[in-house]
Image (spheres, rainbow, N blue to C red):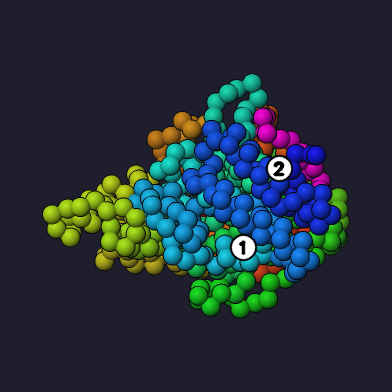
Amino acid sequence: MTDLTHLTIAAALDGLAAKKFSARELADAHLAKMASLKKLNAYITETPDVARAQADASDKRRAAGGKLGALDGIPLGIKDLFCTEGVQTTAGSHILEGFKPTYESTVTKNLFDAGAVMLGKLNLDEFAMGSSNKTSYYGNVINPWKRQGDDTDLVPGGSSGGSSAAVAARIAMAATGTDTGGSIRQPAALTGTVGIKPTYGRCSRWGIVAFASSLDQAGPIARSVEDCAIMLGAMAGHDPKDSTSVEMAVPDFRKALTGNIKGLRVGIPKEYRVDGMSQEISDLWAKGAEWLKAQGAEIKEISLPHTKYALPTYYIIAPAEASSNLARYDGVRFGLRVPGNSLDEMYELTRAAGFGKEVKRRILIGTYVLSAGYYDAYYLQAQKVRALILKDFTDAFKDVDVILTPSTPSAAFGFHENEGDPVQMYLQDVFTVTVNLAGLPGISVPAGLDAKGLPLGLQLIGRAFDEETLLRSAQALEGAANFTALPAGV
Ligand code: GLN
């Protein structure tokens, strides 16, 4: 039998339907590989018992000839930011260690209702703050990719670094991620996987540990555009429990993959040609445009003039919302409690011990920009700039159907590179945060290898709620790039 862990979801669904293997065999193959790749530290909690029970239930449904879900029997990893009933949910933080939610997030419930099998909870940057997975209380996640002839451990991106590493290393067929400023697309780009952040409002945020509520969205990381389409179809949908989730039918995303992009208008934003961009990234970007053109698309230069304000705007709005969201971790309701002589002291000791350095930095920045006297100068101003960034996109989408950019300014880096200067790390998201600020859908597709043999991604950005065009264009890019490289030892 071929190695089941290398199948795409689409191929595994065919194999299950043809009874070539069972859901239990699929789950067991992944669980065995997880045991052999523990050094990657991709999972915080493994749930083999849940996986086997769900796989057996799927096999029973299939044998009985009953109705099957869109992901029946497919083994997935779940980012440990999604609350899972009865299963520890940490958000990568010490403060939530031991927290077992009494409820299921809507996205994971949708996935389980579609027949998915949970292999475990995936590591992430603490409270999804980061681009490298270095801020997790549960340790670094190691990217399965290495530079040629160099054994240095590299970051898998972040914050969904456990998700990207697991999918690249074949210890999850696909995974859930969340993306507040790039946390699905950047890790996907650094691991040769595909990641889509849908339009804000497409997936319910209910039961996802909140970081910055006006930016957070859930989405999948998988090994093909088609698999992302299957995953997103199962994850998305209106949820009365999240007032920002839209009441809109979920299209059949897989059906949108017609292979035809004739007449598609693709915008190339000139402001994304940032200072110091490497020749490799700029060449790949040009190649991406050529690939789409060769399939009948029309390439146009466009302008998104407020791009340069996106990172500073994001780093006011995201910490502001985070400081408010994280106020709830007080030692009373969830996880960790460090006793003190008074209630206030208990709060202080719990928060001092429970949050890591980056989370504390964000809470301080957020509290500062929301404080009386600074609110107008920072937060309100950032909200105004955010409106201008959205307007740039609205204007651009009058002339184009999708926008093509690089996903990240660099390939995966070592754990000690980019160290000491948080701003250097914040620059990882220079191409992705604009999309969150505007609430639009964006996807990263593996497009090539750099000179050291590391994956690089290209990003496509779409109109709000037009994931269909986005996925169709992404598949055209994927076909032309024909990315087949694998990390060593996988
Ligand atoms: N890297 C960005 C940050 O640190 C984005 C994180 C995210 O999308 N969750 O805030």
The question of residue 478 being in magenta is answered with yes
Q: Earlier in the sequence, mark 2 or mark 1?
A: 2
Question: Is the C-beta of the residue carrying label 1 under 8 Å from the nearest atom of ligand 1?
Answer: no
The residue depicted at 54 percent of the width and 29 percent of the height is: 153
The x, y position of residue 110, in whole percent, is 61, 66
Q: Residue 433 in the image: x percent, y percent?
A: 54, 55
Q: Residue at x 28, y 47 (%)?
A: 353
Residue at x 62%, y 51% (from the top left corner): 52
- In the rendered view, would you say 391 is above or below 72? below
Query: Is residue 167 shown to the viewer in this render?
Result: no
The answer to whether marks 2 and 1 mark residues whose Cβ atoms lie closer than 8 Å is no
Looking at the figure, which quarter contains the N terminus?
A: top right
Where is residue 447, by image quadrant?
A: top right
Q: Secondary structure at mark 1?
A: helix
- Taking depth in this image into account, of 57 and 302 the one nearest to the observer is 57
Q: Which residue is mark 1?
A: 112
Residue 71: x %, y % from top left: 70, 60
Q: Is residue 190 left or right of residue 418?
A: right
Which residue is located at x 55 percent, y 67 percent?
A: 106
Where does the magenta region start and end? Answer: 475-490
Specify the farthest residue to the top.
149
Task: Indicate whether 257 appears above or below 488.
Answer: below
Q: Amino acid at mark 2?
A: Thr
Badge 1: few (under 14), some or many (20 or more) residues near its Cα, within 10 Å?
many
What kind of element bears circle 2? helix
* Label 2 lies in ligand 1 vicinity (Cβ under 8 Å): no
Please name whichever residue, 301 or 480, is drawn nearer the observer in this view of the structure. Answer: 480
**Residue labelled with disc 2:** 5
In this view, the residue in front, 362 or 15, is 15
Percent of width and height locating residue 112: 61, 63
